[in-house]
Image (cartoon, rainbow, N blue to C red):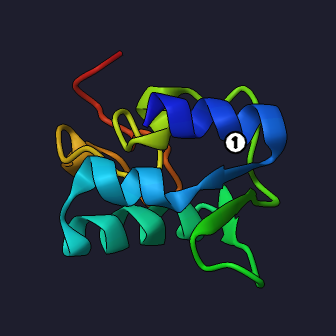
């Protein structure tokens, strides 16, 4: 994955065959592509379904960990979730001054 991301950064495109070979599981490849497409980090080239282009939300600052889903800010931790409101603010709590 590091080579794929490095090539995408350097050239604005990368070969999806490398992803298929690395993951070696059709459902995992689809899940990975859906994740990247959903985050708008890649686009599938219109003339070649095995070529990925840098998407509109792609940034050269994107880390490999984030690209692979680790520490994804889009995923909400359930730890302490009951204490956070939908707006992301901590609720008023009379116990904490």
Residue at image coords 32%, 66%: 29
Picture coordinates of residue 96, whole percent (x, y): 29, 20
Q: Circle 1 — which element?
A: helix
Q: Which residue is mark 1?
A: 8
Picture coordinates of residue 61, whole percent (x, y): 71, 26
Residue at image coords 74%, 34%: 9
Q: Quadrant of the C terminus?
A: top left
In the picture shown, does residue 82 fall above or below 92? below
Task: Decide: few, some or many residues near mark 1? Use Cα within 10 Å; few <14, some 14-19, many ≥20.
Answer: many
Picture coordinates of residue 43, whole percent (x, y): 70, 69
In the picture shown, does residue 61 fall above or below 58? above
Residue at image coords 23%, 73%: 26
Q: Is residue 97 left or right of residue 36?
A: left
Q: Quadrant of the N terminus?
A: top left
In the picture shown, does residue 82 fall above or below 52? above
Q: Is residue 91 left or right of residue 40?
A: left
Question: In this view of the protein, which residue sits in the foreground, 47 or 91?
Answer: 47
Picture coordinates of residue 62, whole percent (x, y): 64, 32
């Amino acid at each position: 994955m590091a080579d794929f991301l490095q090539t995408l950064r350097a050239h604005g495109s990368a070969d999806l065959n490398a992803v298929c070979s690395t993951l070696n599981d059709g459902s995992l490849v689809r899940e990975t592509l859906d994740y990247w497409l959903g985050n708008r980090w890649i686009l599938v080239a219109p003339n070649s379904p095995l070529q990925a282009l840098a998407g509109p939300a792609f940034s050269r600052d994107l880390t490999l960990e984030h690209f692979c889903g680790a520490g994804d800010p889009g995923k909400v931790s359930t730890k302490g979730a009951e204490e956070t409101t939908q707006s992301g603010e901590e609720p008023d709590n009379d116990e904490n001054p």
